[in-house]
Image (tube, rainbow, N blue to C red):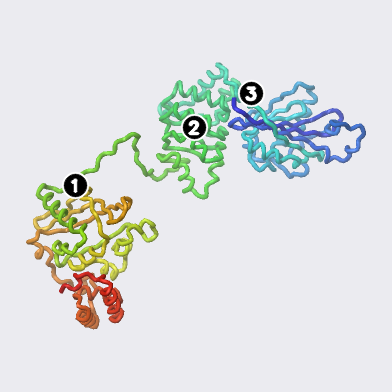
C-alpha cells in the first residue's frame, strides 16, 4: 500500500453540552490523502470569554445553530454557491454516527454541504472535488483529490464566519487511503457491470460508450457504483474489456469526472488497436496527463470541456501540444486537422534504396560520365582556367541557394549566397542581369572566384532531361566539401548542364540578335558606349569585364578606375579579364 495524506477539518464552538467538529477527509489520486479540519473559533464570541469554570476544553464547546432555510447565507465571507459541477460530492452524503440521532441530525443540519462546500470554494485558491461528504457525530467529512487542494483548503482557516458569528478552522493531517477506494467490486456487481457494458458496446464499430456511466439506470437500480476516477472501478472496467473486447477501436469516457489518467495506462497494452478516444467533459487539468496514454496511435480525440483546454494561448498551440503525444491525429474535438507530416512506418523498417541514375541509353551514359570526369577533375584542381575549353562563347551560368536572409544556415554558404540568383525572391531586372554570367570568359572567371572544392563523384546521381541529336540536358546531384574544411562542412548540390556535341556548338547556340523591346539585357546609351570604350582602353580589360566594372560602380568612371587599380594591385582580377 502506498503512503497517503489525510486531511481533517473540524470546528469548535461554545455550547452547553455539544462539541461539534467538521472533519474533511481528502485523498490524492496517487493516494497522498489529507484530512481537513474546519473548526469554529470561540475567540470571536466575546460574550462567552469570561464564563467561569472554563477548563482546557470547556472553552471549545459550541452551540452553533444553522437554519437550513438560510443555508446560502454566511456572515462575513460573502459566499454563494460555487461551481456546482465541482462541488457535488462524488459519493453523496453518508451518515457515520454512533451517537444519538438528535445530535447527528443537528450536526447534519449545521454542516449542510450546500452551505459549507460553496463557502470553502469561494475563498479557496484551488478548485477541488469533494468525495463522500458525510457527518460523524459533530464532524463532517469529505475527501479531496490531492495534497495541493488540501493545503489550499487549510489556508481557508478562520476565513469563514457562520450566521452566529463564529469562525471555521481548517486542519490537515496524514492518513491512509479511505477503505472504499481499495475495495473491489463483488462478483455479482461485476456481472451487472459486464451486462451494462455489453448494452453499451457496438460490435459493428468496435465502440464502447461509457459516457456518464455512474448514472446508468441498470447500475443504479442494482446499487452498483462505477465511478471512473476510482481505482477499483477502473480496474473492473479494464478487466472486462481485456477479457471480452481486446480489439476495441473506440472508447467514450466523457462525463465521468476523470481528473487523472494514471490508472488507464494499463489499458493501453490491453487494447493496442484503439483509434478513437473521447475524454471530453472531464476534469483533466494538464496536457501532461495525455503522456500516460500516448502509446495509443489515436486518429480521433475529444478533450473539450476539460480545464487543460484553457491553458493554451491559441488553437495552434493546443493542437501542437496534443499532436506531440499523438502525431497521427486527424480529428481533435470533432474538427479536422491538417494531415500529419511524418513516416507512417513501423520500426524496425528497411527504407527502400534510392533509385540510381537515369541515362536513357548506354551511349548517353558513356558521354555524360566522360564529361563529368573531365569537368570535375579540373573544377576540383587548383586551376579552373582550363574549363574555358568546356564552354561555348555564348554560354550562360547562374547560381542559386535556397536559404533566406533570415536563416542562420546561409552563413555556411556565404561565398555562394552573395551571388545567388533566386528568381522567386529577386524581382529587380537589373540585378537579375548582373547575376547571370554571360559568355565563357565571365563564367570561368566567376568559377575561379568560388571556394576550392572536392566533389565525391561516387555520390553523383544523373537524370537525363532532354536528348536529341544536337542537344543533351541532364541534372547532376551529389555532395562536396570545401578544401581545408572538416567533414561537417559537407554540402549537397544539384546542377543542370545543357550541352551540345563539339561540332554542333556554333550552330546550336546561334540565335538572332535580340531587339531592344525583347532583350532582357539593358541597352547602353551613347555616353555609356563611349565610357565603356575609353575604360577598356585605359584598363586593358576586354569589353565584357570593363562593362561589369562600370556597372558595379554605377557608371562612375573615376570610381571604377580607382576600384580597378586597387583590385589589380591586390592581384584579384583574373587573367581572363584581359583576353580580347
**Residue 331 image position (x, y, % from top left):** 43, 40
Q: Residue furthest left?
A: 503
CA gap between label 2 and label 3 equals 28 Å
Q: Is residue 52 left or right of residue 127?
A: right
Residue holding disc 3: 179
Q: Compared to 460, does 39 lie above or below?
A: above
Residue holding disc 2: 252
Residue 180 occupies quadrant? top right
Give the mark nearest the N terminus, 1 or 2.
Answer: 2
Q: Compared to 323, does 493 lie above or below?
A: below
Residue 391 visible? The answer is: yes
Badge 1: residue crowd in 10 Å (few <14, some 14–19, many ≥20)? some
Helix, strand, or loop for circle 1? loop
Q: Compared to 539, does 277 lie above or below?
A: above
Report the mark closest to the observer, 2 or 3: 3
Helix, strand, or loop for circle 3? helix
**Residue 343 image position (x, y, % from top left):** 34, 40
Q: Nearer the viewer, residue 131 or 488?
A: 488
Amino acid at each position: 500500500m502506498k503512503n497517503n495524506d489525510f486531511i481533517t477539518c473540524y470546528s469548535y464552538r461554545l455550547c452547553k453540552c455539544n462539541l461539534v467538529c467538521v472533519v474533511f477527509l481528502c485523498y490524492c489520486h496517487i493516494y497522498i490523502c489529507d484530512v481537513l479540519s474546519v473548526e469554529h473559533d470561540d475567540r470571536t464570541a466575546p460574550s462567552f470569554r469570561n464564563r467561569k469554570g472554563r477548563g482546557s476544553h470547556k472553552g471549545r464547546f459550541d452551540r452553533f445553530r444553522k437554519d437550513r432555510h438560510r443555508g446560502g447565507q454566511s456572515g462575513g465571507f460573502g459566499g454563494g454557491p460555487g461551481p456546482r459541477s465541482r462541488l457535488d460530492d462524488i459519493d453523496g452524503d453518508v451518515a457515520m454516527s454512533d451517537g444519538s440521532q438528535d445530535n447527528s441530525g443537528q450536526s447534519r443540519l449545521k454542516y449542510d454541504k450546500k452551505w459549507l462546500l460553496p463557502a470553502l470554494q469561494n475563498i479557496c485558491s484551488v478548485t477541488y472535488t469533494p468525495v463522500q461528504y458525510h457527518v460523524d457525530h459533530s464532524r463532517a467529512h469529505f475527501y479531496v483529490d490531492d495534497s495541493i487542494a488540501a493545503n489550499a483548503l487549510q489556508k481557508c482557516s478562520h476565513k469563514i464566519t457562520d450566521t452566529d458569528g463564529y469562525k471555521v478552522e481548517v486542519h490537515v493531517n496524514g492518513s491512509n487511503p479511505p477503505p472504499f477506494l481499495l475495495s473491489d467490486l463483488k462478483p455479482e456487481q461485476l456481472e451487472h457491470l459486464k451486462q451494462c457494458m455489453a448494452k453499451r458496446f457496438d460490435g459493428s464499430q468496435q465502440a464502447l460508450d461509457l459516457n456518464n456511466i455512474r448514472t446508468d439506470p441498470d447500475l443504479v437500480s442494482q446499487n452498483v457504483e462505477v465511478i471512473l476516477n476510482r481505482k477499483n472501478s477502473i480496474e473492473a472496467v479494464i478487466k472486462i474489456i481485456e477479457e471480452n473486447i481486446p480489439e476495441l477501436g473506440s472508447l467514450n469516457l466523457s462525463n465521468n469526472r476523470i481528473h487523472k489518467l494514471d490508472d488507464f495506462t494499463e489499458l493501453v497494452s490491453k487494447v493496442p488497436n484503439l483509434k478513437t478516444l473521447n475524454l471530453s467533459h472531464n476534469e483533466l487539468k494538464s496536457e501532461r496527463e495525455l503522456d500516460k496514454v500516448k502509446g495509443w496511435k489515436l486518429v480521433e480525440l475529444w478533450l473539450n470541456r476539460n480545464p487543460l483546454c484553457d491553458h493554451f494561448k491559441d488553437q495552434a498551440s493546443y493542437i501542437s501540444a496534443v499532436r506531440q503525444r499523438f502525431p497521427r491525429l486527424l480529428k481533435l474535438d470533432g474538427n479536422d486537422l491538417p494531415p500529419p507530416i511524418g513516416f507512417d512506418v513501423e520500426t524496425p523498417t528497411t527504407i527502400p534504396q534510392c533509385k540510381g541514375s537515369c541515362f536513357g541509353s548506354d551511349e548517353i551514359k558513356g558521354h555524360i560520365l566522360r564529361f563529368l570526369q573531365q569537368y570535375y577533375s579540373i573544377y576540383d584542381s587548383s586551376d579552373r582556367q582550363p574549363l574555358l575549353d568546356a564552354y561555348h562563347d555564348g554560354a550562360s551560368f547562374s547560381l542559386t541557394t535556397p536559404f533566406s536572409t533570415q536563416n542562420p544556415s546561409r552563413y555556411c554558404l556565404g561565398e555562394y549566397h552573395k551571388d545567388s540568383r533566386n528568381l522567386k525572391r529577386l524581382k529587380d531586372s537589373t540585378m537579375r542581369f548582373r547575376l547571370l554570367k554571360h559568355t565563357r570568359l565571365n563564367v570561368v572567371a566567376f568559377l575561379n572566384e568560388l571556394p576550392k572544392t572536392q566533389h565525391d563523384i561516387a555520390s553523383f546521381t544523373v537524370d537525363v532531361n532532354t536528348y536529341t541529336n544536337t542537344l543533351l540536358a541532364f541534372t547532376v546531384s551529389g555532395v562536396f566539401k570545401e578544401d581545408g574544411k572538416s567533414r561537417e562542412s559537407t554540402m549537397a548540390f544539384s546542377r543542370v548542364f545543357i550541352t551540345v556535341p563539339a561540332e554542333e556548338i556554333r550552330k546550336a547556340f546561334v540565335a538572332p540578335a535580340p531587339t531592344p523591346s525583347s532583350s532582357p539585357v539593358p541597352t547602353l546609351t551613347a555616353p555609356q558606349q563611349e565610357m565603356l570604350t575609353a575604360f577598356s582602353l585605359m584598363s586593358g580589360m576586354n569589353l565584357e569585364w570593363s562593362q561589369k566594372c562600370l556597372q558595379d560602380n554605377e557608371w562612375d568612371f573615376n570610381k571604377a578606375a580607382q576600384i580597378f587599380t586597387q583590385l589589380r594591385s591586390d592581384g584579384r582580377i583574373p587573367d581572363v579579364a584581359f583576353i580580347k
